[in-house]
Image (cartoon, helix red, strand yellow):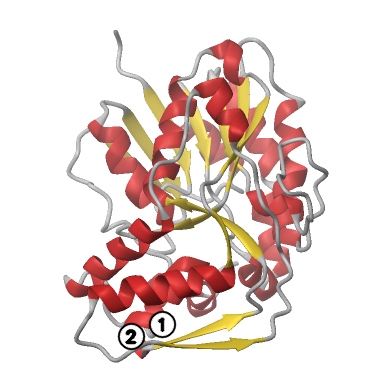
Amino acid sequence: MSQKSIFITGGAGYVGSSLVPDLLKDGYRVTVYDTMYFGDEFLPKQNPNLKLIKGDIRDISKLEISCKNHDYFLHLACISNDASFVLDEKLSTSINLDAFEPLVLAAKKNKIKRFIYASTSSVYGVSKEKNVTEDHPLIPLTLYNKYKGMCEPLLLKHTNDIFEGVIFRPATVCGYAPKLRLDLSVNILTNHAVCKNKITVFGGDQLRPNLHIKDYCDVVKVLIKAPHNKIKNQIFNVGYQNMSIKNIAFLVKKVVEDSFPEKEKIDIDFTKSDDNRSYHINSDKIMEVLGFKPKRSIDEAVKDLCVSFKNNLITKSFDNDFYYNVKRLKNINAK
């Protein structure tokens, strides 16, 4: 059987830094197409099956040439999170919305078999439903979430029997990866607990689903391998533990105190928040259709981060813009 190849936009980010080595270990040929805003030193560049291309997804002619001769196209590239959007709305719109349909068409033109789109579970906004399933109305609260949702039908309108499309809506990702982000809820709380002995919780009652980064990697591999008839034009929620921010904070406090018994007890402060996103996603569909179920807990993600702090894999965690999207975009004046 010939070696399968996958083209990944945004493959030099948080998820990519964990996913790319996994795919290489599984025998795939991988091309990463990325602006390299955070560099690429954390990727296994010595691997002969890895090709790195510094490129912008808005440069459609370059992207079209670069994605030739691949079996799969995984679209991860975006300006991530709401704060980054506020920083430069024009930049965010051009990357997260305007570039999307042209790159879908580039993939289709190059006869790529399957396009996998990483949307987000935050497209649901606020919902009092006990279980938010894939057919729940999309009520995004921010442009980041709105654009993620708007791109979904732009993919599905171009799919057919030889150009498959599948969409997954992952929960908030957590846990250690070589290109770590410390601007995501569980990771933020852990950083504060380890380094400042204090956690500040904004709000607290908002429900947030979470997903360990290794489970994220696993679901991508499932979507690559899944048979045509099970994934064509499908949308899947992917989350594990739906917990309130308050309960996540107490869990982080316990794990960090257990991991660093020599430290003082960790304080938790509560303050008001203007981030009202709250939803409880149901991920039964992907289990029923593809047999996938996340198996790593928030607890494990926090433990992994604690081990990484102990081993000095995370340094200058409040000052280094490597860990923060907004700071890095500001510092390099991204346009």
Q: Nearer the viewer, residue 196 or 144?
A: 196
Q: Quadrant of the C terminus?
A: bottom right
Q: Is residue 161 left or right of residue 217?
A: right
Is there any visible trace of residue 291 in the rendered image? yes
Name the secondary structure under disc 1.
helix
Categorize mark 2 by other alpha carbons within 10 Å: few (<14), some (14-19), many (20+). few
Q: Amino acid at mark 1?
A: His
Q: Is residue 103 left or right of residue 254?
A: right
The image quarter containing residue 203 is bottom right
The image quarter containing residue 49 is top left
The percent coordinates of residue 89 (x first, y second) are 72, 67
Q: Nearer the viewer, residue 306 or 226?
A: 306
The percent coordinates of residue 251 (x first, y second) are 43, 69
**Residue drawn at point x = 72 percent, y = 42 percent:** 151
The percent coordinates of residue 319 (x first, y second) are 38, 85
Q: Quadrant of the N terminus?
A: top left
Q: Nearer the viewer, residue 225 or 276?
A: 276
**Residue drawn at point x = 45 percent, y = 21 percent:** 71
The residue at which mark 2 appears reads as 195
**Is the Cβ of the residue at disc 2 closer than 8 Å to that at disc 1?**
yes
Q: Amino acid at mark 2?
A: Cys
170 in relation to 317, above or below: above
The residue at which mark 1 appears reads as 192
- Residue 255 is marked as none
113 in relation to 147, above or below: above
**Residue drawn at point x = 27 percent, y = 42 percent:** 21
112 in relation to 303, above or below: above
